[in-house]
Image (cartoon, rainbow, N blue to C red):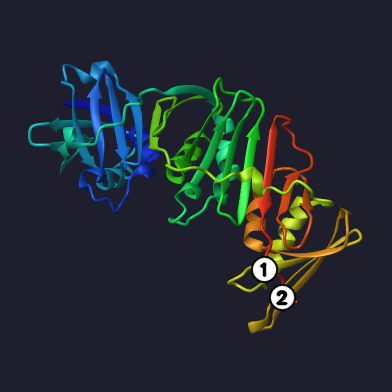
Protein backbone atom coordinates (compact mmCIF):
# COMPACT_ATOMS: atom_id res chain seq x y z
CA UNK A 1 0.00 0.00 0.00
CA UNK A 2 1.59 3.27 -1.15
CA UNK A 3 0.44 6.84 -1.68
CA UNK A 4 1.80 10.39 -1.95
CA UNK A 5 0.21 13.41 -0.27
CA UNK A 6 1.32 17.01 0.33
CA UNK A 7 2.23 17.60 3.99
CA UNK A 8 0.08 20.77 4.57
CA UNK A 9 -2.97 19.08 3.01
CA UNK A 10 -2.63 16.03 5.23
CA UNK A 11 -1.94 18.08 8.36
CA UNK A 12 -4.95 20.35 7.78
CA UNK A 13 -7.29 17.39 7.35
CA UNK A 14 -5.92 15.51 10.35
CA UNK A 15 -6.26 18.59 12.56
CA UNK A 16 -9.90 18.85 11.45
CA UNK A 17 -10.72 15.44 12.95
CA UNK A 18 -8.12 15.24 15.75
CA UNK A 19 -10.50 16.84 18.28
CA UNK A 20 -12.45 13.57 18.31
CA UNK A 21 -9.48 11.64 19.71
CA UNK A 22 -9.59 10.76 23.40
CA UNK A 23 -6.43 10.47 25.51
CA UNK A 24 -7.98 8.23 28.17
CA UNK A 25 -9.64 5.62 26.00
CA UNK A 26 -9.99 2.01 27.15
CA UNK A 27 -9.49 0.89 23.54
CA UNK A 28 -5.84 1.58 22.58
CA UNK A 29 -6.51 1.47 18.82
CA UNK A 30 -8.60 4.64 19.20
CA UNK A 31 -5.35 6.54 19.85
CA UNK A 32 -4.72 6.04 16.12
CA UNK A 33 -5.98 7.52 12.88
CA UNK A 34 -7.43 4.90 10.56
CA UNK A 35 -5.94 5.35 7.07
CA UNK A 36 -7.84 3.63 4.24
CA UNK A 37 -6.89 3.68 0.58
CA UNK A 38 -9.93 3.08 -1.59
CA UNK A 39 -11.25 4.30 -4.92
CA UNK A 40 -8.28 6.59 -5.53
CA UNK A 41 -8.94 8.41 -2.26
CA UNK A 42 -7.31 8.48 1.14
CA UNK A 43 -10.00 8.16 3.82
CA UNK A 44 -8.84 9.06 7.35
CA UNK A 45 -10.99 8.37 10.42
CA UNK A 46 -10.78 9.35 14.10
CA UNK A 47 -13.15 7.96 16.72
CA UNK A 48 -13.87 7.73 20.45
CA UNK A 49 -16.80 5.30 19.87
CA UNK A 50 -19.33 8.05 20.74
CA UNK A 51 -18.20 10.33 17.90
CA UNK A 52 -16.54 9.32 14.64
CA UNK A 53 -15.20 11.82 12.12
CA UNK A 54 -13.88 11.07 8.64
CA UNK A 55 -12.11 13.13 5.95
CA UNK A 56 -11.77 12.14 2.29
CA UNK A 57 -8.56 13.31 0.61
CA UNK A 58 -8.34 13.08 -3.18
CA UNK A 59 -5.03 11.69 -4.41
CA UNK A 60 -3.28 12.08 -7.75
CA UNK A 61 -3.91 8.78 -9.54
CA UNK A 62 -0.52 9.01 -11.26
CA UNK A 63 1.25 8.94 -7.90
CA UNK A 64 -0.79 5.94 -6.77
CA UNK A 65 0.48 3.72 -9.56
CA UNK A 66 -0.67 0.15 -9.01
CA UNK A 67 -0.92 0.53 -5.24
CA UNK A 68 -3.27 -1.95 -3.63
CA UNK A 69 -6.17 -0.79 -1.52
CA UNK A 70 -5.97 -1.44 2.21
CA UNK A 71 -6.06 0.05 5.70
CA UNK A 72 -3.71 0.76 8.60
CA UNK A 73 -4.10 2.42 12.01
CA UNK A 74 -1.33 5.03 12.51
CA UNK A 75 -0.45 6.54 15.95
CA UNK A 76 -2.18 9.93 15.90
CA UNK A 77 -0.01 11.93 18.30
CA UNK A 78 3.31 10.96 16.71
CA UNK A 79 1.99 11.56 13.19
CA UNK A 80 0.60 15.00 14.04
CA UNK A 81 3.80 16.04 15.81
CA UNK A 82 5.94 15.04 12.84
CA UNK A 83 3.65 16.64 10.23
CA UNK A 84 3.92 20.01 12.00
CA UNK A 85 7.69 20.00 11.40
CA UNK A 86 7.60 19.37 7.64
CA UNK A 87 7.72 22.17 5.05
CA UNK A 88 5.34 22.08 2.08
CA UNK A 89 6.68 18.91 0.45
CA UNK A 90 5.20 15.66 -0.84
CA UNK A 91 5.19 12.79 1.66
CA UNK A 92 5.48 9.24 0.38
CA UNK A 93 3.73 6.69 2.61
CA UNK A 94 4.85 3.08 2.09
CA UNK A 95 2.86 0.65 4.23
CA UNK A 96 3.41 -3.05 4.79
CA UNK A 97 -0.09 -4.21 5.72
CA UNK A 98 1.21 -7.66 6.74
CA UNK A 99 3.37 -6.49 9.64
CA UNK A 100 1.78 -3.00 9.98
CA UNK A 101 5.04 -1.18 9.28
CA UNK A 102 4.87 2.43 8.08
CA UNK A 103 7.63 4.32 6.29
CA UNK A 104 7.30 8.01 5.46
CA UNK A 105 9.73 9.49 2.94
CA UNK A 106 10.06 13.28 2.94
CA UNK A 107 12.78 14.91 0.88
CA UNK A 108 16.06 13.39 2.08
CA UNK A 109 14.50 11.89 5.22
CA UNK A 110 12.90 8.57 6.04
CA UNK A 111 10.78 7.97 9.13
CA UNK A 112 9.53 4.61 10.34
CA UNK A 113 6.87 3.72 12.88
CA UNK A 114 4.60 0.82 13.74
CA UNK A 115 0.86 0.88 13.29
CA UNK A 116 -1.96 -1.53 14.01
CA UNK A 117 -4.20 -3.68 11.87
CA UNK A 118 -6.79 -1.35 10.34
CA UNK A 119 -9.43 -4.09 10.37
CA UNK A 120 -9.45 -3.92 14.19
CA UNK A 121 -10.62 -0.29 14.11
CA UNK A 122 -14.31 0.03 15.18
CA UNK A 123 -16.77 0.15 12.30
CA UNK A 124 -18.70 3.35 11.59
CA UNK A 125 -22.38 2.79 12.46
CA UNK A 126 -24.72 2.39 9.50
CA UNK A 127 -27.95 4.37 9.85
CA UNK A 128 -31.13 2.40 9.25
CA UNK A 129 -34.67 3.80 9.10
CA UNK A 130 -33.17 7.27 8.91
CA UNK A 131 -34.57 10.67 7.96
CA UNK A 132 -32.61 13.23 5.93
CA UNK A 133 -32.75 17.02 6.14
CA UNK A 134 -30.44 19.63 4.59
CA UNK A 135 -29.50 22.78 6.51
CA UNK A 136 -27.05 25.56 5.65
CA UNK A 137 -23.75 25.48 7.53
CA UNK A 138 -24.17 29.06 8.76
CA UNK A 139 -27.47 28.16 10.47
CA UNK A 140 -25.93 25.15 12.24
CA UNK A 141 -22.77 26.97 13.34
CA UNK A 142 -24.79 29.92 14.67
CA UNK A 143 -27.29 27.66 16.45
CA UNK A 144 -24.48 25.78 18.19
CA UNK A 145 -22.60 28.90 19.28
CA UNK A 146 -25.79 30.54 20.60
CA UNK A 147 -26.83 27.55 22.72
CA UNK A 148 -23.97 25.20 23.60
CA UNK A 149 -22.61 27.44 26.39
CA UNK A 150 -25.85 26.95 28.35
CA UNK A 151 -25.66 23.15 28.42
CA UNK A 152 -24.96 21.39 31.71
CA UNK A 153 -22.03 19.43 33.15
CA UNK A 154 -23.95 17.28 35.64
CA UNK A 155 -23.47 13.61 34.70
CA UNK A 156 -26.55 12.75 36.79
CA UNK A 157 -28.65 14.74 34.30
CA UNK A 158 -27.37 13.32 31.00
CA UNK A 159 -30.10 14.91 28.85
CA UNK A 160 -28.78 18.35 29.85
CA UNK A 161 -25.24 17.52 28.71
CA UNK A 162 -26.06 18.40 25.10
CA UNK A 163 -28.24 20.52 22.85
CA UNK A 164 -31.86 19.60 22.15
CA UNK A 165 -32.71 19.85 18.44
CA UNK A 166 -36.37 20.06 17.44
CA UNK A 167 -37.38 19.90 13.77
CA UNK A 168 -40.92 20.72 12.63
CA UNK A 169 -42.65 21.63 9.33
CA UNK A 170 -42.73 25.25 10.64
CA UNK A 171 -39.21 25.82 12.00
CA UNK A 172 -36.19 24.33 13.75
CA UNK A 173 -35.27 24.99 17.38
CA UNK A 174 -32.05 24.42 19.32
CA UNK A 175 -32.21 24.52 23.13
CA UNK A 176 -29.64 24.06 25.89
CA UNK A 177 -30.04 24.40 29.66
CA UNK A 178 -28.34 23.45 32.91
CA UNK A 179 -31.40 24.38 35.05
CA UNK A 180 -29.76 27.73 35.99
CA UNK A 181 -29.67 29.25 32.52
CA UNK A 182 -31.33 28.44 29.21
CA UNK A 183 -30.66 29.42 25.60
CA UNK A 184 -33.17 28.92 22.78
CA UNK A 185 -32.36 29.55 19.12
CA UNK A 186 -35.14 29.22 16.55
CA UNK A 187 -35.08 29.60 12.75
CA UNK A 188 -38.32 30.10 10.86
CA UNK A 189 -36.68 29.86 7.42
CA UNK A 190 -35.55 26.25 7.95
CA UNK A 191 -38.16 23.51 8.00
CA UNK A 192 -38.39 19.72 8.02
CA UNK A 193 -41.00 17.59 6.28
CA UNK A 194 -41.68 15.58 9.44
CA UNK A 195 -41.42 16.54 13.09
CA UNK A 196 -38.52 15.01 15.02
CA UNK A 197 -36.37 15.77 18.05
CA UNK A 198 -33.06 14.50 19.43
CA UNK A 199 -30.27 15.51 21.83
CA UNK A 200 -26.79 16.06 20.39
CA UNK A 201 -23.74 15.71 22.70
CA UNK A 202 -21.24 18.54 23.26
CA UNK A 203 -18.16 16.99 21.68
CA UNK A 204 -19.53 16.48 18.15
CA UNK A 205 -21.22 19.89 18.34
CA UNK A 206 -17.87 21.55 19.10
CA UNK A 207 -16.32 19.66 16.20
CA UNK A 208 -19.12 20.80 13.88
CA UNK A 209 -18.85 24.41 15.03
CA UNK A 210 -15.09 24.46 14.39
CA UNK A 211 -15.54 22.93 10.93
CA UNK A 212 -18.53 25.03 9.82
CA UNK A 213 -17.79 28.53 11.13
CA UNK A 214 -17.41 31.16 8.38
CA UNK A 215 -18.65 28.78 5.70
CA UNK A 216 -21.72 28.91 3.48
CA UNK A 217 -22.30 25.33 2.36
CA UNK A 218 -25.16 22.81 2.55
CA UNK A 219 -24.94 20.22 5.33
CA UNK A 220 -26.80 16.93 4.98
CA UNK A 221 -28.12 15.63 8.32
CA UNK A 222 -29.29 12.05 8.54
CA UNK A 223 -30.70 10.76 11.82
CA UNK A 224 -32.56 7.90 13.46
CA UNK A 225 -33.34 6.92 17.06
CA UNK A 226 -29.69 6.27 17.99
CA UNK A 227 -27.34 8.27 15.77
CA UNK A 228 -26.99 11.48 13.78
CA UNK A 229 -24.85 11.70 10.65
CA UNK A 230 -23.53 15.01 9.24
CA UNK A 231 -21.83 15.28 5.84
CA UNK A 232 -20.41 18.35 4.08
CA UNK A 233 -17.53 19.02 1.71
CA UNK A 234 -15.04 16.16 2.29
CA UNK A 235 -16.04 15.65 5.94
CA UNK A 236 -18.40 13.16 7.58
CA UNK A 237 -19.31 13.03 11.26
CA UNK A 238 -21.49 10.49 13.02
CA UNK A 239 -22.38 10.68 16.71
CA UNK A 240 -24.44 8.70 19.16
CA UNK A 241 -27.44 10.68 20.41
CA UNK A 242 -28.04 11.25 24.12
CA UNK A 243 -30.80 8.92 25.26
CA UNK A 244 -33.66 10.32 27.32
CA UNK A 245 -36.56 12.79 27.32
CA UNK A 246 -35.64 16.46 27.29
CA UNK A 247 -37.41 18.63 29.90
CA UNK A 248 -40.34 20.77 28.79
CA UNK A 249 -38.32 23.95 28.30
CA UNK A 250 -41.31 26.07 27.22
CA UNK A 251 -42.92 25.49 30.63
CA UNK A 252 -40.06 27.26 32.47
CA UNK A 253 -40.12 30.38 30.27
CA UNK A 254 -42.33 32.92 32.09
CA UNK A 255 -44.97 34.40 29.81
CA UNK A 256 -46.07 37.39 31.94
CA UNK A 257 -43.15 39.80 32.38
CA UNK A 258 -44.50 43.31 33.00
CA UNK A 259 -41.11 44.86 33.86
CA UNK A 260 -39.09 45.58 30.72
CA UNK A 261 -35.63 47.13 30.64
CA UNK A 262 -33.95 48.19 27.38
CA UNK A 263 -30.22 48.89 27.52
CA UNK A 264 -27.11 49.09 25.34
CA UNK A 265 -25.69 45.55 25.30
CA UNK A 266 -21.97 46.40 25.19
CA UNK A 267 -22.23 49.04 27.94
CA UNK A 268 -24.13 46.59 30.13
CA UNK A 269 -21.69 43.75 29.41
CA UNK A 270 -18.61 45.86 30.18
CA UNK A 271 -20.16 47.17 33.40
CA UNK A 272 -20.97 43.60 34.51
CA UNK A 273 -17.39 42.54 33.74
CA UNK A 274 -15.94 45.36 35.85
CA UNK A 275 -18.29 44.99 38.79
CA UNK A 276 -18.02 41.17 38.83
CA UNK A 277 -14.31 41.42 39.70
CA UNK A 278 -15.37 42.66 43.14
CA UNK A 279 -18.12 40.06 43.65
CA UNK A 280 -17.94 37.00 45.88
CA UNK A 281 -15.85 34.52 43.88
CA UNK A 282 -18.01 31.54 44.81
CA UNK A 283 -21.45 33.03 44.08
CA UNK A 284 -20.44 35.64 41.43
CA UNK A 285 -23.54 37.54 42.51
CA UNK A 286 -24.33 40.98 41.11
CA UNK A 287 -27.28 43.10 42.16
CA UNK A 288 -29.39 45.00 39.64
CA UNK A 289 -31.44 47.86 41.08
CA UNK A 290 -33.77 49.54 38.59
CA UNK A 291 -35.40 52.82 39.42
CA UNK A 292 -36.83 55.31 36.95
CA UNK A 293 -34.59 55.33 33.88
CA UNK A 294 -31.46 54.25 35.75
CA UNK A 295 -29.87 50.87 36.37
CA UNK A 296 -27.53 50.46 39.33
CA UNK A 297 -25.20 47.46 39.16
CA UNK A 298 -23.40 46.48 42.36
CA UNK A 299 -21.46 43.61 43.89
CA UNK A 300 -19.64 42.99 47.13
CA UNK A 301 -17.44 40.44 48.81
CA UNK A 302 -17.88 41.02 52.53
CA UNK A 303 -15.08 38.62 53.52
CA UNK A 304 -12.48 40.75 51.72
CA UNK A 305 -14.20 44.15 52.00
CA UNK A 306 -14.50 44.37 48.21
CA UNK A 307 -17.29 46.44 46.72
CA UNK A 308 -18.21 47.94 43.34
CA UNK A 309 -21.10 49.98 42.01
CA UNK A 310 -21.96 51.46 38.61
CA UNK A 311 -24.84 53.44 37.19
CA UNK A 312 -26.11 53.10 33.62
CA UNK A 313 -28.83 54.94 31.73
CA UNK A 314 -31.61 52.71 30.44
CA UNK A 315 -35.18 52.72 29.20
CA UNK A 316 -37.42 51.07 31.79
CA UNK A 317 -41.11 50.33 31.85
CA UNK A 318 -42.21 48.74 35.13
CA UNK A 319 -42.08 48.92 38.90
CA UNK A 320 -38.85 49.71 40.76
CA UNK A 321 -37.16 46.43 41.68
CA UNK A 322 -33.97 44.74 42.81
CA UNK A 323 -32.87 41.38 41.47
CA UNK A 324 -29.69 39.31 41.74
CA UNK A 325 -28.00 37.27 39.02
CA UNK A 326 -24.87 35.20 38.58
CA UNK A 327 -22.51 37.56 36.72
CA UNK A 328 -20.86 34.71 34.80
CA UNK A 329 -24.20 33.66 33.32
CA UNK A 330 -25.04 37.24 32.34
CA UNK A 331 -21.66 37.68 30.63
CA UNK A 332 -22.08 34.45 28.65
CA UNK A 333 -25.54 35.45 27.47
CA UNK A 334 -24.66 39.03 26.59
CA UNK A 335 -21.63 37.78 24.63
CA UNK A 336 -23.85 35.48 22.56
CA UNK A 337 -26.37 38.13 21.50
CA UNK A 338 -25.33 40.26 18.53
CA UNK A 339 -27.77 43.17 18.63
CA UNK A 340 -26.79 46.65 19.79
CA UNK A 341 -29.67 46.90 22.29
CA UNK A 342 -31.22 44.18 24.43
CA UNK A 343 -34.43 43.84 26.42
CA UNK A 344 -34.45 42.25 29.86
CA UNK A 345 -37.94 41.09 30.81
CA UNK A 346 -38.71 40.42 34.49
CA UNK A 347 -41.68 39.85 36.77
CA UNK A 348 -40.50 39.22 40.36
CA UNK A 349 -37.06 39.12 42.06
CA UNK A 350 -37.51 35.36 42.56
CA UNK A 351 -38.54 34.63 38.96
CA UNK A 352 -36.37 34.09 35.90
CA UNK A 353 -35.20 37.01 33.79
CA UNK A 354 -35.37 36.85 29.99
CA UNK A 355 -32.86 38.46 27.62
CA UNK A 356 -33.83 39.06 23.99
CA UNK A 357 -32.31 41.24 21.24
CA UNK A 358 -34.18 44.45 20.43
CA UNK A 359 -33.13 44.81 16.80
CA UNK A 360 -32.43 41.40 15.30
CA UNK A 361 -31.02 41.82 11.78
CA UNK A 362 -32.33 38.44 10.64
CA UNK A 363 -36.12 38.47 10.88
CA UNK A 364 -36.21 34.67 10.58
CA UNK A 365 -34.09 34.32 13.72
CA UNK A 366 -35.59 34.10 17.21
CA UNK A 367 -33.13 34.19 20.14
CA UNK A 368 -34.13 33.93 23.78
CA UNK A 369 -31.88 33.63 26.84
CA UNK A 370 -33.24 32.84 30.30
CA UNK A 371 -31.35 33.19 33.59
CA UNK A 372 -32.53 32.19 37.05
CA UNK A 373 -32.07 34.79 39.81
CA UNK A 374 -29.98 34.35 42.95
CA UNK A 375 -31.20 35.30 46.41
CA UNK A 376 -30.01 38.75 47.45
CA UNK A 377 -28.34 39.36 50.78
CA UNK A 378 -30.23 42.20 52.38
Could you say where residue 231 lies in the image, as x and y percent from the top left?
43, 26
Residue positioned 65% across, 49% down in the render: 252
Q: Residue at x 38, y 44 (%)?
A: 19
Q: Which residue is mark 2?
A: 377
What is the distance, in whole Å, between disc 2 and disc 1 at their CAs?
A: 10 Å
Q: Which residue is mark 1?
A: 285
Q: Earlier in the sequence, mark 2 or mark 1?
A: 1
Task: Please indicate whether residue 264 sits to the left or right of residue 229 in the image.
Answer: right
Residue drawn 56% across and 33% down?
A: 166
Give yes or no for contact between labels 2 and 1 (Cβ–Cβ under 8 Å): yes
Q: Is residue 15 left or right of residue 29?
A: right
Task: Judge left or right: residue 292 versus residue 76.
Answer: right
Q: Is residue 208 visible?
A: yes
The quarter holding residue 242 reads top left
Task: Indicate the position of residue 302 as horizontal and vertical percent values.
Answer: 67, 81
Tell me the quadrant of the picture where the N terminus can be found: top left
* Residue 62 image label: none
Residue 367: horizontal and vertical position, in percent? 68, 40
Query: How many residues crowd around disc 1 within 10 Å: few (fewer than 14), some, or many (20 or more)?
Result: many
103 or 272, nearer to the observer: 272
Comparing labels 2 and 1, the label whose residue is closer to the camera: 2
Question: In the displayed structure, would residue 332 be above or below residue 36?
Answer: below
Amino acid sequence: MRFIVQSPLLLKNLQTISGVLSSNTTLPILENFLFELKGGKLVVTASDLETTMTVNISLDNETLGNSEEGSIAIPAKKLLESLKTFPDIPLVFSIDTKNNGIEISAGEGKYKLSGQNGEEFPQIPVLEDSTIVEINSDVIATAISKTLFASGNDELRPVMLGVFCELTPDDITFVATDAHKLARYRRKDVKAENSASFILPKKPLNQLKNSLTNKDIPVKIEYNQRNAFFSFENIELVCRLIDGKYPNYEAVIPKENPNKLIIDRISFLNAIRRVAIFANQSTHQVRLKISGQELFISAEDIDYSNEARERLACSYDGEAMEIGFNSKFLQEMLSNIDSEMITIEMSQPNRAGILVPVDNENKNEDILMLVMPVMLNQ
